[in-house]
Image (cartoon, rainbow, N blue to C red):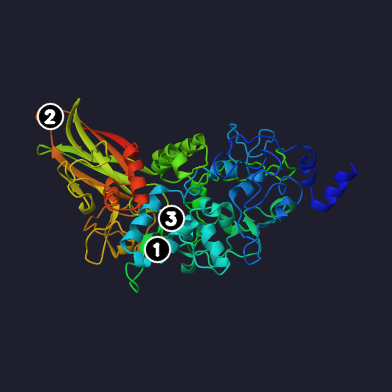
């Protein structure tokens, strides 16, 4: 009892729960064990996985986190790999913390490890694309790799920056465990609010200090356990709830030649700002506002957000809301590729976790992304005439992010069991049937033949006006028919970077939706026809892979090999059926 009172006075109310650290062996298993080159997670045995560079005997006891890894210049390493955070922010069978109402592991570590964020450095498509850019312009290799690793291996980048060293680039980071951690905990949670939302922060230029403060969304954090076990200080930082934090990496401009105007390669944050979802407008938060975190980090309800290193519950406050670190995005295709090639790629997340994250991704794509409707259907002058309205339900363009991504309409007109018309069909390789040159397909407002396919995409051109998949050659957008978010305005913020391109005089391509018009021959015998419309989506179109086939680098060859073995059926974002008499 004397020990309890002493700890409570010194460390606060969490101390009673943390007594288990002193008297319970660290053998409580995690529900989703981590295997692979990073080793077992904390909580599997004394000293296991207690952070980057810690040797035997330096983990598992009180005060172990004070053994911060030292850099060559004598300063403490500002970053730790995610296993250090998993010491308390992973689930345990002996704790109630971090389990959902349905008994699922919703711990930050358990969810994060199977996301594209955690695997951003391992992403074989990214590695292939970087190698392609470097092979095409070897004189700019250092600059290209430095730009790319800023967001795909940010701990390696910022660690070098803080120590006054040049960027290690991609090749120089392959053996670095912190780079392998991708977008890791101690990057996002050490980012300061300074400059967020301004151009100075874009392209991954976060401000990270050396104070070892971990910012979180909750006021009055119980900071003592984190400080004792890791050497970091839990600190309230409201900015981690804000889209501007995400916007630092999800706003990227490139330059095709030195001194050229910046090309808006990825602009999800800017698109969100110019939408009804923004929280940053003159009116502040409105009824339609949603931050990035509110859409991509599902609320898990009230719970304690940590357990003690012995695997038992801390006596800490219940927090509400608690948002899942699953970062549901739009790239189920790549999650499947990571799972199927886990050993070759060094993926440490369990395959079951990768499957779960892919399921969550497909659920969001299918239910929260777009809606379709057949409108103005009629049969006149021997033609079936109708429109398909596609509504963007997201807070940014659809699709958004990396410029390879595309969505398109597949539309069938049926008379009974007979298919009279089929536009937008795809083959086993994921290619759209009937397109001779997919990178030169114009915007379609009116479709009259199966060879005409409405594709919602961005197509960039180089300085000669030729379509290109090289980010370092992109000079302008010849086509940007990605669906605008609701509330987008031509006089709104960042309109120049987010405006559509190549839509001609399409009057019903408006903020939040587009109507594509169809005219196809009616059945000879008359009668009712059925219209079925799908909105299909790809993150890696075959035309982008075709360019990689001609790139002589190990990374390109590896990705092409994995791609050729993958299931290439596009995702379905929406489907609708209409009947026309």
Quadrant including the C terminus: top left
Q: Which residue matches tag 3?
A: 276
The answer to which image quadrant residue 94 occupies is top right
Q: Which residue matches tag 2?
A: 526
The answer to which image quadrant residue 411 occupies is top left
The mark that comes first in sequence, 3 or 2, is: 3
In the drawing, does residue 505 fall left or right of residue 322? left
Q: Residue furthest bottom?
A: 259
Crowding at mark 2 (Cα within 10 Å: few <14, some 14-19, many 20+): few
For label 2, the SS is: loop
Residue at left offset 42%, top offset 37%: 340
The answer to the question of whether label 2 and label 1 lie on touching residues, with beta carbons closer than 8 A, is no
As rendered, which of 458 and 142 lies closer to the eye? Answer: 142
Crowding at mark 3 (Cα within 10 Å: few <14, some 14-19, many 20+): many
Can I make out residue 182 in this image?
A: no
In the drawing, does residue 78 fall left or right of residue 438? right
The mark that comes first in sequence, 3 or 1, is: 1
Image coords of residue 494 (percent x, y): 39, 65
As rendered, which of 543 and 513 lies closer to the eye? Answer: 543
Crowding at mark 1 (Cα within 10 Å: few <14, some 14-19, many 20+): many
Q: Is residue 294 above or below residue 35?
A: below
For label 3, the SS is: loop
Residue at left offset 52%, top offset 42%: 348
Marks 3 and 2, Cα distance to the nearest angstrom?
Answer: 45 Å
Marks 3 and 1, Cα distance to the nearest angstrom?
Answer: 35 Å
């Amino acid at each position: 009892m004397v020990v309890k009172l002493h700890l409570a006075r010194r460390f606060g109310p969490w101390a009673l729960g943390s007594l288990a650290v002193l008297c319970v062996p660290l053998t409580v298993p995690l529900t989703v064990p981590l295997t692979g080159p990073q080793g077992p997670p904390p909580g599997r045995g004394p000293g296991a996985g207690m952070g980057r560079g810690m040797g035997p005997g330096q983990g598992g006891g009180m005060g172990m986190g004070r053994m911060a890894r030292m850099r060559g210049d004598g300063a403490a390493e500002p970053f730790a790999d995610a296993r250090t955070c998993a010491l308390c922010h992973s689930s345990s069978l002996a704790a109630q913390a971090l389990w959902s109402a349905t008994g699922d592991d919703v711990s930050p570590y358990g969810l994060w490890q199977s996301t594209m964020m955690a695997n951003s450095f391992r992403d074989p498509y990214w590695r292939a694309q970087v190698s392609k850019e470097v092979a095409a312009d070897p004189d700019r290799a250092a600059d290209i790799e430095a730009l790319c690793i800023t967001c795909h291996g940010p701990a390696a980048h910022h660690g070098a920056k803080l120590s006054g060293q040049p960027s290690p680039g991609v090749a120089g980071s392959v053996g670095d465990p912190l780079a392998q951690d991708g977008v890791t905990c101690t990057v996002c949670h050490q980012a300061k609010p300074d400059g967020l939302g301004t151009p100075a922060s874009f392209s991954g230029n976060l401000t990270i200090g050396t104070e070892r403060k971990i910012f979180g969304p909750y006021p009055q954090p119980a900071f003592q356990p984190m400080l004792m076990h890791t050497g970091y200080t839990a600190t309230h930082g409201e900015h981690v709830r804000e889209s501007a934090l995400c916007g630092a990496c999800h706003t990227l401009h490139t330059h095709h030649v030195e001194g050229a105007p910046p090309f808006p390669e990825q602009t999800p944050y800017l698109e969100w700002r110019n939408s009804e979802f923004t929280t940053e407008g003159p009116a502040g938060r409105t009824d339609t506002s949603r931050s990035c975190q509110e859409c991509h980090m599902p609320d898990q309800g009230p719970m304690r957000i940590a357990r003690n290193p012995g695997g038992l519950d801390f006596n800490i406050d219940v927090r509400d809301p608690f948002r899942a670190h699953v970062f549901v995005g739009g790239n189920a295709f790549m999650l499947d590729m990571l799972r199927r090639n886990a050993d070759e790629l060094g993926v440490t997340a369990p395959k079951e976790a990768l499957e779960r994250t892919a399921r969550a991704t497909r659920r969001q794509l299918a239910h929260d992304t777009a809606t379709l409707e057949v409108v103005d259907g009629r049969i006149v002058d021997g033609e079936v005439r109708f429109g398909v309205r596609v509504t963007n339900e997201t807070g940014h363009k659809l699709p958004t992010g990396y410029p390879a991504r595309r969505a398109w309409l597949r539309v069938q007109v049926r008379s009974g069991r007979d298919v009279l018309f089929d536009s937008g069909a795809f083959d086993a390789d994921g290619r759209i049937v009937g397109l001779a040159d997919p990178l030169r397909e114009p915007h379609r407002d009116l479709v009259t033949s199966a060879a005409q396919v409405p594709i919602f995409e961005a197509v960039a051109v180089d300085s000669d006006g030729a379509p290109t998949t090289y980010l370092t050659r992109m000079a302008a957008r010849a086509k940007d028919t990605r669906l605008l978010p609701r509330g987008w305005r031509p006089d709104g913020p960042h309109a120049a970077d987010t405006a559509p391109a190549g839509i001609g005089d399409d009057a019903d391509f408006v903020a939040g939706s587009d109507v594509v018009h169809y005219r196809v021959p009616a059945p000879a015998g008359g009668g009712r026809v059925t219209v079925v419309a799908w909105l299909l989506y790809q993150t890696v179109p075959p035309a982008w892979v075709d360019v990689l086939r001609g790139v002589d680098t190990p990374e390109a060859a590896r990705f092409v090999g994995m791609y050729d073995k993958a299931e290439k059926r596009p995702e379905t974002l929406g489907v609708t059926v209409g009947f026309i008499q």
